């Protein structure tokens, strides 16, 4: 098992057959090929896709799961190690302990995860590490924050926005000094 952990954030609403699901699964395979341990929220959608790809590529997959309205939900089938969290904040603390963070297609929950990771770096509560967001949607969010909020160039530089999984892997290597 790798000592390097990357947490991947993404929507639970993405389903198999959707291009974003395929991209997330491919990201998992590529991360495994680079020797990463992969941590996700452990449930369905993009989390399952990344987990599936990472497991197929031989990576150790950690699922930081949350209870649903009916109690604790089982992790997706590709999680090798489940770490149940009592609530969203405990889950965030566990996922944000990773060495790098990557966000695939997502919604409000994914945005919250990105925002917390970003803010921790901005305020020097954690050492800077790669925070990579994939897709035009995330670039639009960053543009809006830069245009409409008090987020300056140094703040925006903490997040690397890329168009696709291949660019994310290249950015991850560059941010870690590996290429």
Image (tube, grey):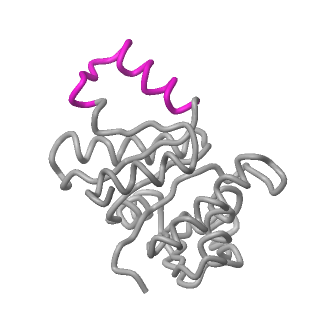
Q: Is residue 55 above or below residue 46?
A: below
Q: Position of residue 132 (x, y in %)?
A: 42, 46
User: Which residue sits furthest front?
Assistant: 179
Q: Position of residue 82 (x, y in %)?
A: 54, 80
Q: Quadrant of residue 160?
A: top left
- Quick one: 46 or 149, which is closer to the camera? 46
Which region is colored magenta?
137-155
- Image quarter in which the N terminus is found: bottom left
User: Which residue sits furthest top?
Assistant: 147
- Quick one: 56 or 76, which is closer to the camera? 56
Name the chief secondary structure element in magenta. Answer: helix
- Quick one: 116 or 135, which is closer to the camera? 135
Left or right, 82 with reference to 13: left
Q: Is residue 122 above or below residue 70?
A: above
Left or right, 146 with reference to 41: left
Q: Is residue 149 above or below residue 36?
A: above
Which residue shows up at 68% across the image and 71% down it?
A: 52
Q: Position of residue 13 (x, y in %)?
A: 72, 49
User: Which residue sits furthest left?
Assistant: 124
Q: Quadrant of residue 148?
A: top left
Is residue 149 a member of the stretch shown in magenta?
yes
Is residue 151 a member of the stretch shown in magenta?
yes
- Image quarter in which the C terminus is found: bottom left
Which residue shows up at 72% across the image and 53% down it?
A: 21
Which residue shows up at 51% across the image and 81% down it?
A: 60
Number of marks in the image? 0
Which residue shows up at 27% across the image and 18% down it?
A: 150
């Amino acid at each position: 098992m790798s000592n390097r952990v990357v947490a991947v954030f993404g929507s639970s609403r993405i389903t198999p057959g959707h291009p974003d699901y395929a991209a997330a699964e491919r990201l998992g395979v590529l991360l495994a090929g680079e020797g990463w341990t992969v941590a996700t929220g452990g449930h369905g959608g993009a989390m399952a896709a990344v987990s599936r790809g990472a497991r197929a590529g031989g990576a150790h997959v950690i699922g930081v799961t949350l209870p649903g309205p009916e109690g604790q939900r089982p992790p997706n089938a590709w999680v090798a190690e489940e770490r149940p969290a009592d609530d969203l904040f405990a889950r965030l603390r566990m996922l944000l302990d990773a060495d790098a963070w990557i966000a695939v297609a997502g919604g409000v929950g994914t945005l919250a995860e990105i925002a917390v990771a970003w803010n921790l770096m901005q305020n020097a509560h954690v050492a800077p590490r790669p925070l990579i967001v994939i897709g035009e949607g995330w670039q639009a969010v960053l543009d809006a924050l830069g245009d409409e909020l008090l987020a300056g160039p140094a703040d925006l530089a903490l997040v690397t926005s890329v168009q696709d999984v291949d660019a994310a892997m290249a950015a991850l290597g560059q941010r870690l000094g590996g290429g």
